[in-house]
Every structure is written in structure tokens, then in C-alpha cells.
Amino acid sequence: MATSDFFNPDYRSAREAFLAAAVGAGARLSSHVLPDHRGPAGEPLAIDAAALGPAEPESLLLLISGTHGVEGLAGSGCQVGVLLDELHGALPAGGGALLIHALNPHGFAWLRRGNEHNIDLNRNGLDFRGPLPENPAYDALHDALLPGDWDGPERQRADTLLEAFITGQGMAAYQAALQRGQYTHPTGLFYGGSRPSWSLSTLEKILTDHLGPACRRLAVIDLHTGLGPWGYGELIGSGSTDDDWERLQRWYGPEVTRPGLGPSSSSVVSGSVPVFLRRMLPAMELTVLALEYGTRPIDQVLAALRADAWLHAVPDRPTPHREAIRRQVRDAFLIDSPAWRAAVYGRCADVVLRACRGLGG
């Protein structure tokens, strides 16, 4: 099978390909269906988990796709390739692999970055019993990001306000204001929610089922698209201690980036999945990496997310722009090019093999 064929055009076919590849690899499968929601063709929406190796591993490689819904189109293709190429064969003795397919199945199926409640799962990892982060920079931009109309004078006024912010403070500041995450505007961009999402609660259940007392080391690779140069997979590390960062660089090399401390396509964010994992597994050795693939320039990606948020801020909004916006979002996070797909899978395979070596070190 050609590398490009690992990738599928929609959630339904991607899920079928993942399940078939997992069965072919001899994986133990479990499925967790999202209640009260269906896909565009009426199909059930589920997080699927494929486990390989010992039932009670001493170390575990966790490979996640679809944290940001539509980005699962690329992440799923990587997972299918990992299964078909049997890359788990590089794991150390006693090591296992767990592939989580479509952590956000609703967003995956409906071509949205957020979930069924517009929640960004990578901003939802906080302890909601305490105070939530504030983001006054986003608050000041929210009304301009989501004007009442997508055409005409109101849209023009909103665009003028956003352009003035970018001209005065720069695109990096605009990206940071949006990307950090916000907890006050449920219809807005990068909304972190007000309580734990079904997806992260389900992830906790899956990990609880698969992480026995013998497991002391967890290597996480979370697959993303939308930031950085075309086809390049940036290795974005996440660590809470100096030992974490030393281990990340030992496993993956000096190219590992750290948002906020050195060059990275990503801004610092609140409530990420790594934050969630550290709260859940305080005694575990965690080596966490986001593998982020570039698609289009950042202004185009943010414009697509703005259009999507506007479209869904009002349920069943009557608009002639619906299909164009859905295509705009898809094109912001997946490139329909064999060369791009080959670059994406090749980088993923390399990183997975480095993680396997690291777990054996």
C-alpha cells in the first residue's frame, strides 16, 4: 500500500481503516461511543483504543489522534501506517503500545477543531475545582472575531479592528491571544470549557484500564496539524521538571521545542492534555511530545477557525457560506498531496521509533 493510502477523506472511512489495521496487527480493541451524537451519515461516533504487547506492560507508548477533531484526518493516517508497518515491533521487552483513535470523534466527523460543545480538548485539562485562567486579550477581541454577519459593514468593522490589533502588536501577539485558551466565551475560539469533557474523562478510563501497577514509564505522542512550515513535523515538548526536558532531548534530539522558551510555532496554552496526564498520573515518568505538522500560513489557519466559530455560534445559522467554511477548515488542517502525506507519515514513523528506543533506555 502506498503511504498516501494510509490517509482517508472522512471520519467514517478513517475509523474503518484504523480498526482493520488494528485487527491485522493483532491488537486488543475497545470502543467508547459518544452518547447522544451521530456523524454526518448517522454513524456512531467513538473513541477507539488498540492495545499491543503485554496486557500489563512495564512501559507504554501512547499515540493519540484527533485531539483537535479535524486534525484526526492526518493523525489517523499516521496511526494506520504505524499499525500496518508493525512499528510496535521496536518496543523493548515488556513494553506495550496503546493507540487512541479520534479522541474528539465529534469534531473529527463534523470537520471541527472543537468537540460537541465547542470545547478545545487541549485547553480542557485543568482542575475545574479551582479558579480558571483569565485571558483579557481574547476577551477584547471576541466580538470582532464573531461579528453578527459574515458580509457587509459589520464584518468590515470587525476586520478593521482585528487588522489594527495585528498591525499594532504583531501576528505573534494575535496568535498568542487566541491560542492561549479562554474560559468565558462558550461560542468562541479555543474555548476550554467549564468542566471536564467526555473525551478526557474517557481517556482517563482507557488509561486506567491499560496502566497496571507494573507500568512506570509512559511515552506520549499527540498528533496535530495546522502550525509551522508545510509538511514539517515540529517536536513540541512538554515537561514539568528539568529531568523531563533532559529526557526529551536525549530521546528526540535538540530539535525539541519549548513554547515560550525558544522558537516554536505554538504559543503557550492553558489546560493542555499533558497537564491533564500529569494530574492523573503524578508518580509516572511521563515523556510527552506533540508532533505538529505544518499545513498553511498561520493567518489562513486562524481565519478558518474564526469562520468555523462564527458558523457554529448560532445553531442552524442560515448562510450560503456553510459548505465553503467547512472546506476552508478541512483545507487548513489537511493537505491533499501525496508528498505532504509521505512527509507526515515518514516523520511520525521516525518519532515513534525514537520513542521505542527511549523506552528501552
Image (cartoon, rainbow, N blue to C red):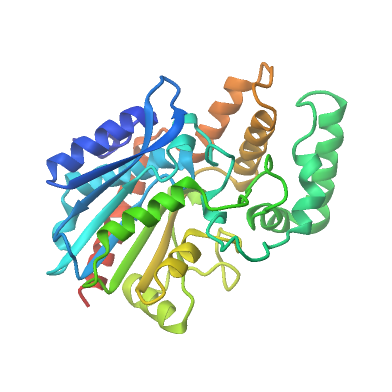
Task: Report the number of numbered marks.
Answer: 0
Q: Nearer the viewer, residue 12 or 153?
A: 12
Task: Name the residue at 38% across, 47% down.
Answer: 65
Q: Residue furthest bottom?
A: 242
Extreme-front residue of the structure: 129
User: Where residue 228 sits in the image (x, y, percent)?
Assistant: 52, 53
Q: Nearer the viewer, residue 243 or 118?
A: 118
Between 32 and 109, which is closer to the camera in this rendering? Answer: 32
Specify whether residue 92 is in view: yes
Identify which residue is drawn at 31% across, 46% down: 78
Residue at 27% in and 57% down? 209
Q: Is residue 14 left or right of residue 180?
A: left
Quadrant into which the C terminus falls: bottom left
* Quarter of the image that includes the N terminus: top left
Q: Quarter-wise, where is residue 176 in the image? A: bottom right
Q: Residue at x 35, y 54 (%)?
A: 205
Residue 308 percent coordinates (x, y): 62, 33
Residue 9 percent location from the top left of the image: 38, 29
Reply above or below: 269 against 328. below
Indicate the position of residue 220 as horizontal and vertical percent values.
35, 62
- For residue 195, side relative to residue 37 (left or right): right
- Decide if residue 350 is in sight here: no
Residue 146 falls left or right of residue 208 = right
